[in-house]
Image: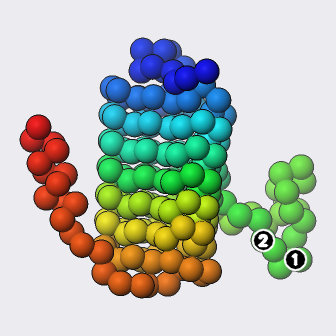
Amino acid sequence: LGYYKTEELKNFGFLSIGDNVQIAKTCNIVGIENISIGNNVRIDDFCVISAGKSIVIGNNVHIACYSSLIGQGEIIMDDFSGLSSRVSVYSSSDDYSGEFLTNPTVDSEFTGVISKPVYLGKHVIVGAGSVILPGVSLQNGVAVGSLSLVTKSFEEYKIIGGLPAKFIKERKRKIEELEWSYLKK
């Protein structure tokens, strides 16, 4: 089926949309009026983008196939960030304690849904199959290993991974120089 082109997407009702945006025609997008997308963005097949409060996608962002951004809280993906295949980013979660009913078929007065913003800074890359939970902030340059469960925030230029994700080692900052060279071009 291919990708929608920017010209088509400008008529869809996004809050804002930049230039050179490609979104696969197989994506499911909900709350389109709450979604802002920058320039040079590609969202691949079978992604689910469901915005409650807002989803902000910066410039030069890639979201690989089968990934999802879902929830009532704000989700921000800053410039040059990316999600590998099957990454799930949640800004809302049911309360699993047993104190509340769960799932969206139940009136909200009986549920204990928790919604918190999620932030992925510049140059954050998230490996395949990882899950990011509400309230997580990954500062610039964080790299998340595949199949990780990210339950807490991490400072800039850390490589993290595991279940739950923990610090592995520092990440090199050469990507900042490469960004400047790319932007000058």
Disc 2 crowd, CA 10 A, few/some/many (<14, 14-19, 20+)? some
Decide which of 101, 61 is in the foreground and name it.
61
- Left/right placement of residue 72 relative to residue 75 reads right
Disc 1 crowd, CA 10 A, few/some/many (<14, 14-19, 20+)? few
> Decide: marks 2, 1 in contact (CB < 8 A)?
yes
The answer to whether residue 150 shows anywhere in this view is: yes
Q: Residue at x 60, y 73 (%)?
A: 149
**Which quadrant does the C terminus fall into?**
top left
Q: Secondary structure at mark 2?
A: loop
On the image, the x and y values in percent for residue 13 come to 53, 22
Q: Which residue is mark 1?
A: 99
Colour scheme in the image? rainbow
The answer to whether residue 152 shows anywhere in this view is: no
The number of discs equals 2
Q: Residue at x 51, y 54 (%)?
A: 84
Decide which of 67, 75 is in the foreground and name it.
67
Q: Residue at x 62, y 54 (%)?
A: 86
The numbered mark at residue 95 is: 2
Q: Quadrant of residue 12?
A: top right
Q: Quadrant of residue 61?
A: top left
Picture layout, residue 140 above or below residue 181: below
Q: Quadrant of residue 135?
A: bottom right
On the image, the x and y values in percent for residue 150 come to 56, 73
Picture layout, residue 150 above or below residue 182: below
**Which quadrant does the N terminus fall into?**
top right
Give the Cα distance between marks 2 and 1: 8 Å
Q: Residue at x 35, y 84 (%)?
A: 169
Residue type, numbered disc 1: Glu
On the image, the x and y values in percent for residue 19 come to 33, 26
Residue type, numbered disc 2: Asp
